[in-house]
Every structure is written in C-alpha cells, then in structure tokens.
Amino acid sequence: MLEINPDFSISEEDIQLIFIRASGPGGQNVNKVSSAVQLRFNTLSAGLPVEIRTRLEQIAKKRINTEGVLIIEANRYSTQERNREDAVERLVALLRRAFEEPEKRTRTRVPVVEKKRRLEDKRMRSVKKSLRKKNPEIIDGSIE
C-alpha cells in the first residue's frame, strides 16, 4: 500500500508497471536492456474522490489519456529498480498535490486614486506626443 495522506492510500495492484527500452545514449547496452519504466495508474477505478480526480486531471493534463489512465515514464537512471522507484515517487507526488486544497483567490479592487493617476499619466503622455506634431491641437486648455 502506498500512503498518499493519512486518510487515503492506494493499493499496488492499482499500479501497472511496464518495462521498456530507454531512448538516448547508452552504448550497446541500450538495445538489450529494458531499463525504462512506464507506470500506468487508472484514475477512474482507483477509488479517488471526484474532486481529487478532477484536480489530478488539471495537474497532469498531458499525461492522462482519454480512458482516464495516468502514464508516467521514468528513464532518468540506468537501472530498472531506480526508474521504478522514481516513477512511483512521481505518482505519489502528483497525488499529494491533487489532495492539497487550492487557496481561494481573494478579489482585490484597484483604488480610485490609482485609476485617476493612471489616466492622468496617459493624458500627459498623449500631450507630450501631440507636441511632436507639426500642428498641435489645443483642447481643454491643454495642447493635444
């Protein structure tokens, strides 16, 4: 059993490990040894709560296929055992992130003084640029 948090753990039967050949450099050994690991975790049949599964789908968008299977490929290390551990650690980290409650965003307002200052700055910039013209126009006592 893999413990995600004190309230939830997943069974190792829910995880499917497939050993594949790693790409990249490795000499002659790369064509003979399947050291990379492809971890498959079915999010629909794992007993995840709906809100957690939704958060997991948002976090790992590209790694979940249309059947709801999360696929993690691990080929950082040269040994099969280390890659297997790495894939499981990454799955646990993703699930722990999904179990964290996102912080509620508190809406803020731009102060009225800031709006007025911004509009005044824009107007002054407009005046400055209009003075570069050959025939500046005078409107409201200022040159525009």
Image (cartoon, rainbow, N blue to C red):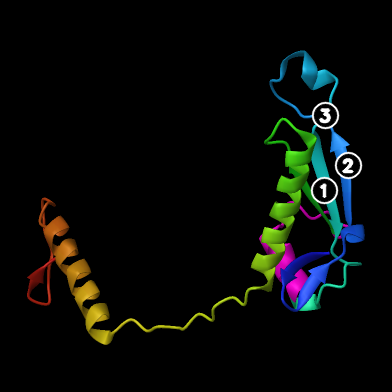
Q: Are discs 1 and 2 less than 8 Å apart at CB? A: yes
- Work out how far the residue at label 1 is from the one at label 2, CA to CA, in angstroms: 6 Å
Question: How many residues crowd around disc 2 within 10 Å: few (fewer than 14), some, or many (20 or more)?
Answer: some
Q: In this rendering, is residue 19 above or below 68? A: above
Q: Secondary structure at mark 1?
A: strand
**Highlighted range, magenta:** 52-68
The foreground one among 78 and 95 is: 78
Question: Label for residue 21?
Answer: 3
Image quadrant for the C terminus?
A: bottom left
Q: Is residue 89 magenta?
A: no
Image quadrant for the N terminus?
A: bottom right
Residue under label 1: 39
State the image coordinates of residue 79 (x, y, percent, origin top left).
75, 33
Q: Is residue 55 magenta?
A: yes
Instruction: Locate residue 21: give its quadrant.
Output: top right
State the image coordinates of residue 47 (x, y, percent, origin top left).
87, 72
Instruction: Locate residue 9: give its quadrant.
Output: bottom right
State the image coordinates of residue 3 (x, y, percent, origin top left).
76, 67
Q: In this rendering, is residue 127 above or below 134? A: below
At 71% from the left and 20% from the top, the residue drawn is 26
